[in-house]
Image: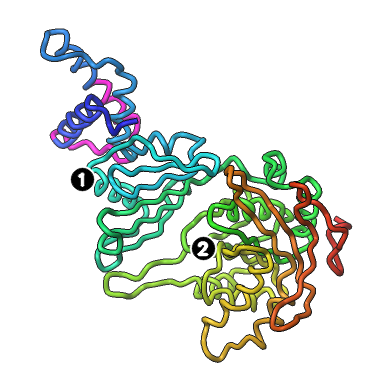
């Protein structure tokens, strides 16, 4: 698909001129925008009938393109509307990619430099966040829950880089993951029982392996009435119908003030009477605050980038050290072993399939500086299978 068709662009521009002339505000008013577009198409058809120019071949297509320019996100709007597209990214005006079922493809969409700048402005308009030379990166949540990341030159070589990871409402529960083949029925039953039993769970995996989706599904299994407080850099977790408070970090202002870190949010979350504390993803020293909270008896959940479930335990022993020189491994390691009940590892296969490949539980003991763990579920002949090992004091079987 090429960028906005000539007819869609010209119709949109004429509507813009009319909006400016009449002082109409189309922000968020799709009905008014569609009325004006259809009115302009009717006028265009009348001019064509009088022999002024060629008629628009496909009025419905031209209307969709014009509306995408006026109220949506222009040339990428069709990808945002396509439920099969999981992610959209732009490396440059002529390098627009999408991912379907975990597999990326270069589209035929071509934008102008001006269109890319306009797209960034439109994407950020509703987020309250900014990007400029003093702050060349931005993370934000779009109104539909999709995650936006933008980087601009001179951090990028020549063109702005835009990434939109769409928020999927198709997967809400562990049962949905079973239906998709990402999780075995027995593993789903075990995880549901573990959540109900108040176990602290870490979801690990690489980029795009489905960590956030699994974390949301796990939280969907909490007992009714549990109060959940989530802490994220940008809002991604969506838990409808539950007692949930979502907290989001904030970037510093132009003066370098007003920043709200995840560490600060974790501390604030503990004052909100949580029955369960969730950190969307631990990357830095906030891992320490999460571990301390879980070690005090508060069930927790989080995700972490790691190549294996055991690598996730190693990372959780390392990240808290970023909190300061007064924190050492002799304190962190036993805290991780005592606080984390399960690590669930996700993988993205070469064919784009996302699935859980391993579930382990720390045993509480260590050897050569590493935390020992036992495998509860593992991949055997392409299937997630029980090993026969049951966590000590497992209460899930009674639920």
Residue segment shown in magenta = 21-39
Residue in the image at 30% along x and 50% along y: 120
Quadrant of the rendered image containing residue 227: bottom right
Drawn side of residue 28 relative to residue 365, left or right: left
Q: Position of residue 61 (x, y in %)?
A: 33, 22
Could you tell me residue 242's position as x and y percent?
Answer: 63, 52
Q: Regarding mark 1 in the picture, which secondary structure is present there?
A: helix
Residue occupied by mark 2: 232
Residue closer to the observer: 59 or 258: 59
Residue 117 horizontal side relative to residue 257, left or right = left
Please, what secondary structure does the residue beneath circle 2 have? Answer: strand
For mark 2, does the 10 Å Cα neighbourhood hold few (<14), some (14 to 19), or many (20 or more) residues?
many
Classify 346 as above or below 18. Answer: below
Residue at image x 12%, y 8%?
50
Q: Which mark is residue 270?
A: none
Q: Which residue is tagged 1?
A: 114
225, 396: nearer the viewer: 396
Q: Judge left or right: residue 174 versus residue 85.
A: right
Residue at left offset 61%, top offset 64%: 302
Nearer to us: label 1 or label 2:
1
């Amino acid at each position: 698909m090429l960028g906005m068709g000539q007819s869609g662009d010209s119709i949109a521009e004429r509507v813009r001129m009319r909006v400016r002339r009449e002082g109409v505000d189309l922000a968020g008013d799709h009905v008014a925008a569609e009325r004006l577009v259809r009115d302009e198409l009717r006028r265009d058809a009348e001019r064509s009938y009088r022999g002024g120019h060629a008629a628009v071949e496909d009025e419905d297509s031209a209307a969709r393109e014009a509306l995408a320019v006026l109220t949506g996100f222009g040339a990428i709007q069709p990808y945002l509307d396509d439920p099969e597209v999981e992610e959209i990214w732009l490396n440059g005006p002529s390098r627009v990619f999408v991912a379907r079922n975990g597999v990326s493809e270069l589209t035929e969409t071509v934008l102008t430099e001006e269109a890319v700048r306009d797209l960034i402005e439109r994407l950020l308009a509703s987020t309250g966040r900014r990007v400029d030379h003093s702050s060349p990166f931005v993370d934000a949540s779009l109104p539909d829950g999709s995650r936006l990341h933008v980087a601009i030159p001179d951090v990028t070589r020549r063109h702005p880089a835009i990434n939109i990871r769409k928020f999927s409402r198709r997967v809400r529960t562990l049962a949905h993951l079973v239906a998709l083949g990402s999780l075995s029925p027995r593993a789903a039953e075990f995880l549901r029982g573990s959540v109900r039993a108040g176990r602290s769970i870490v979801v690990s995996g690489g980029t795009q392996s489905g960590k956030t989706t699994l974390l949301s599904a796990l939280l969907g299994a909490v007992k009714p009435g549990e109060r959940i407080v989530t802490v994220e850099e940008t809002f991604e977790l969506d838990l409808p119908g539950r007692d949930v408070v979502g907290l989001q970090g904030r970037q510093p202002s132009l003066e370098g003030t007003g920043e709200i870190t995840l560490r600060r949010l974790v501390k604030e979350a503990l004052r909100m009477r949580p029955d369960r504390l969730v950190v969307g993803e631990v990357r830095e020293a906030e891992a320490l605050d999460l571990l301390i909270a879980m070690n005090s008896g508060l069930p927790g959940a989080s995700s972490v980038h790691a190549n294996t479930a055991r690598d996730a335990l190693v990372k959780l022993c390392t990240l808290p050290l970023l909190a300061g020189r007064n924190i050492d491994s002799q304190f962190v390691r036993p805290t991780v072993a005592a606080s984390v009940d399960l690590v669930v590892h996700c993988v993205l296969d070469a064919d784009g399939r996302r699935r859980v490949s391993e579930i382990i539980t720390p045993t509480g003991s260590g050897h050569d500086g590493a935390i020992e763990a036992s495998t509860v579920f593992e991949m055997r002949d392409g299937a997630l299978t029980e090993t026969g090992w049951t966590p000590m004091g497992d209460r899930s079987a009674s639920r």
